[in-house]
Image (tube, rainbow, N blue to C red):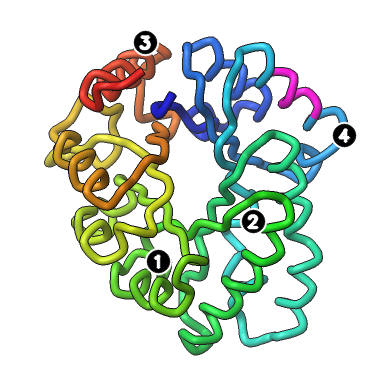
Amino acid sequence: MRIGMSSSCFYPEETEVSLRRIGESGAKTAEIFFNTPSELQGDLLRELCAIRDHYGMEIVSIHPFMSFAEGFWLFSEYERRFRDSLDFYPHFFEAAEALGAHLFVLHGAKNLKIEPARYAERLFLLNEKAKPFGVQVAHENVVHYVGKDPAFMEMLQKALGRDFAMVLDLKQAYRTGVDPFAFIETVGDSIVHVHASDSDMTHDCMPPGKGAFPFPRLFDALEGHGYNGKYLIELYRHNFRDERDLTEAQAFLRRTLGTD
């Protein structure tokens, strides 16, 4: 069950509706993109767990709705706000634990407002908060964010060692103008999760199998670094026509990977 899907594919449908559609597509592995605080607890969280159980899915990762503000909360010059954030983020980690997810996807900061060493230290401290819940914080490469640069990710890897983890997002690398294989070459041992999408000369985000991205090369390159994580299809709603595109994309990745 190494091939799955993110609930963000169906945004702006409500999160529980999106997760149900993932289950209906036949995917057995999923990432949940939370969209508002009420989804982190109570009836809505219980409903997400029930949908997971009904379809026999594994939730491997969660994506917070705080991504737009992580530079402000976690990586700004205002130390007190960062300390307060360490009391807030465990709400996400608790929800991840309830769902059985072990990865927390972080966008990081858009601009480097603090020294790289302080950035790495704060990432370390956030990850320390996540560990008691069985969760690893994984920094994603995102266009217009500091993580778009393989050299920045390499700096974090050198600073944090085994406490550094990365999410490789193919479409974000394409949008940044960075070859995704550059991340594999520099920090391949730290990549723990992949957001999969396809691309061609005119489209930067397509269902896998519809473009020209060299997936066999990707699988081989990651395997060379011991990668045994998941490949989660992450598109936006305007990037596919209907569920058939998503079902075909899953089948394409399974055939190409030779699994499931």
Residue bearing the label numbered 3: 244
Question: Magenta part of the protein: which range?
Answer: 46-51
- Name the one closer to the observer, 247 or 125: 125
Q: Is residue 50 magenta?
A: yes
Q: Secondary structure at mark 4?
A: helix
- The circle drawn on residue 147 is 1
Q: Amino acid at mark 2?
A: Met
Q: Amino acid at mark 4?
A: Gly
**Residue at x 40% of width, y 14% of height:** 242
**Residue at x 38% of width, y 54% of height:** 191
**Image quadrant occupied by the N terminus:** top left
Evaluate if marks 4 and 3 touch, with contact meaning CB atoms under 8 Å apart: no
Local packing at callout 1 (Cα closer than 10 Å; few below 14, some 14-19, many 20+) is many
The mark that comes first in sequence, 2 or 3, is 2
Q: Secondary structure at mark 2?
A: loop
Residue bearing the label numbered 2: 66
Cα gap from disc 2 to disc 1, whole angstroms: 16 Å
The mark that comes first in sequence, 4 or 2, is 4
Above or below, 130 relative to 120: above
From the viewer's perspective, is the residue at label 2 or at label 1 nearer?
1
Horizontal and vertical percent for residue 21?
A: 56, 16
Local packing at callout 4 (Cα closer than 10 Å; few below 14, some 14-19, many 20+) is few
Q: Amino acid at mark 1?
A: Gly
Horizontal and vertical percent for residue 237?
A: 44, 29
Horizontal and vertical percent for residue 31?
A: 54, 35
Residue bearing the label numbered 4: 42
Cα gap from disc 4 to disc 3, whole angstroms: 33 Å
Q: Is residue 235 visible?
A: no
Q: Secondary structure at mark 1?
A: helix
The mark that comes first in sequence, 2 or 1, is 2
